[in-house]
Image (spheres, rainbow, N blue to C red):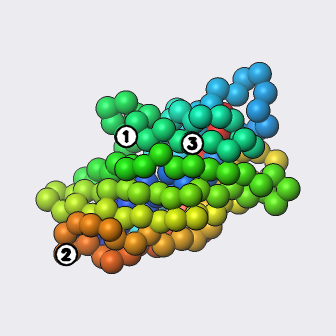
């Protein structure tokens, strides 16, 4: 897989991560305002655990990028790609519809000397049953800056990302 394709995968991962796809039972005594995330794109997997949120679902919340990105977080991707989230996504929940919505995801992916920055807005997620696990709907992130070698946009397919709130 070429560097641009791998970089697109990382970009999509971060976008998904920031959007707030998540899983968790309704807030209770054990809820600790954290979220774990995973995304698989074109054979590349990126994950993080224990990122901080400003509240527990179904309350509107913000995901703290400094607890996803290194050094404060543990975001890692297989292969030679690195990624970082540039914003703190705001996530709202509609429990009646079983959905979540992230306002925006702004990420940067890098492989070797190639750096690409992408942004997606109004990203929708479907809740997995009665849990607080959410799986992404398909979305496209548009390039906002980076090398001319970066694609103009990257698409994340439905089901390629999830978040679990706990």
The percent coordinates of residue 162 (x first, y second) are 59, 53
The structure residue drawn at horizontal position 48% and vertical position 38%, both measured from the top left corner, is 64
The structure residue drawn at horizontal position 57% and vertical position 71%, both measured from the top left corner, is 138
Outermost residue, right side: 96
Disc with the residue nearer the chain's start (1 vs 3): 3
The percent coordinates of residue 30 (x first, y second) are 72, 23
Q: Secondary structure at mark 3?
A: strand
Between 112 and 124, the one lying in front of the other is: 124
The residue identified by callout 1 is 69
Q: Which quadrant of the rendered structure holds the N terminus?
A: bottom left
The residue identified by callout 3 is 62
User: Tag 1: Cα neighbours inside 10 Å, few (<14), some, or many (≥20)?
Assistant: many
The structure residue drawn at horizontal position 69% and vertical position 35%, both measured from the top left corner, is 56
Outermost residue, top side: 29
Q: Secondary structure at mark 1?
A: loop
Question: Is residue 54 in view?
Answer: yes
Residue 120 got which mark? none
- Tell me where residue 3 sits by quadrant: bottom left
Disc with the residue nearer the chain's start (3 vs 2): 3
The percent coordinates of residue 29 (x first, y second) are 77, 22
The percent coordinates of residue 39 (x first, y second) are 49, 55
The residue identified by callout 2 is 148
Q: Secondary structure at mark 2?
A: loop
Q: Nearer the viewer, mark 1 or mark 3?
A: 3
In this view, 101 is above or below 130: below
């Amino acid at each position: 897989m070429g560097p641009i394709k791998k970089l697109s995968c990382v970009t999509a991962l971060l976008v998904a991560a920031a959007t707030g796809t998540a899983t968790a039972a309704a807030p209770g005594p054990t809820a600790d305002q954290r979220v774990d995330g995973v995304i698989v794109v074109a054979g590349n997997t990126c994950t993080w655990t224990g990122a901080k949120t400003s509240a527990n679902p179904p309350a509107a919340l913000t995901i703290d990028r400094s607890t996803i990105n290194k050094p404060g977080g543990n975001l890692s991707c297989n292969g030679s790609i690195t990624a970082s989230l540039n914003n703190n996504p705001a996530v709202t929940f509609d429990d009646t519809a079983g959905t979540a919505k992230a306002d925006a995801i702004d990420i940067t992916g890098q492989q070797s000397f190639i750096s690409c920055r992408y942004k997606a807005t109004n990203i929708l997620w479907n809740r997995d049953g009665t849990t607080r696990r959410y799986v992404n709907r398909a979305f496209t992130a548009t390039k906002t800056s980076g090398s001319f070698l970066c694609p103009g946009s990257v698409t994340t397919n439905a089901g390629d990302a999830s978040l679990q709130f706990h």
